[in-house]
Amino acid sequence: MTAIPDGVSTTGPRSGDLLTIGQLAARSGLAASALRYYESLGLIHATRTSGGQRRYLRGTLRRIAFVRAAQRVGLSLDEARVALDRLPERPAPSGAEWTAVAASWQGRIDEQIAELELLKAKLTGCIGCGCLSLTRCALYNADDRAAQAGPGARYLLTRDPATGPEPAPADVPGGCGTRADTP
């Protein structure tokens, strides 16, 4: 129970601990529409006044910061929600609880680092190749089945959309690094 200055006591948070959607938007840097979307996904939660207005606990700012950090490291909003579901709503999660959730991201971050290193290696190899072909480059146009069938809107020209474009002609040159596209 929280004592209010006029002597009336009530349960729940004090009105000073609650933020309107406008206040939360200003403090978090997100638009009110984004906050409503986050709420629809279960990332944040609001209570309602008797007039139906949303009120957010001040701790919601931490949850929003957490979601934004998750997005910056490449996690989806769904992945952020799963992580937040492991944290208590009230009282605010402890430092150890935040740390445990952040540690659960390590595998995902390591995967992203590996993907970026592979992209860097491919890019370096592509620049070294010198083919500069936007139609055959294994990096820019990797495994493009439609391009093998020739120029134009291949799927619109296809007789059977379920099977893809027409078979590629036998004389289509190889991929990046074959130097087939240079004179």
Image (tube, grey):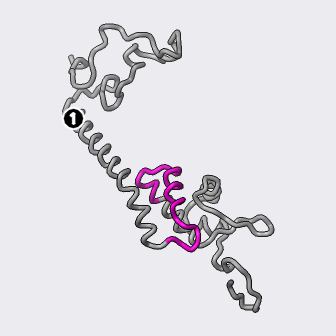
User: Is 40 displayed left or right of 85 in the figure?
Assistant: right
User: Is 158 displayed left or right of 90 in the figure?
Assistant: left
Q: Is residue 9 above or below residue 120?
A: below
Identify the residue at horizontal 74%, vertical 86% (top origin): 9
Identify the residue at horizontal 65%, vertical 71% (top origin): 19
Q: Quadrant of residue 54?
A: bottom right
Q: Quadrant of the C terminus?
A: top left
As drawn, which residue projects farthest toward the right? 51
Q: Quadrant of residue 46?
A: bottom right
Q: Return the residue at label 1.
A: 125
Residue 72 in magenta stretch: yes
Q: Quadrant of the N terminus?
A: bottom right
Residue 15, given in percent of the width and then of the height, sits at 69, 78
Q: Is residue 9 above or below residue 138?
A: below
88 or 137, which lies in front? Answer: 88
Residue 91, given in percent of the width and then of the height, sits at 56, 74
**Which residues, given as a range, are shown in magenta?**
69-93
Identify the residue at horizontal 21%, vertical 21% (top origin): 178
User: Is 144 displayed left or right of 121 in the figure?
Assistant: right
Residue 172 in magenta stretch: no
29 or 92, which lies in front? Answer: 92
User: Is 94 displayed left or right of 171 in the figure?
Assistant: right
Q: Is residue 132 above or below residue 182?
A: below
Q: Secondary structure at mark 1?
A: helix
As drawn, which residue projects farthest toward the top? 170
Q: What amino acid is found at the position of numbered circle 1 in the picture?
A: Gly
Mark 1 neighbour density, 10 Å: few (under 14) some (14–19) many (20 or more): some
118 or 22, which lies in front? Answer: 118
Identify the residue at horizontal 54%, vertical 72% (top origin): 92
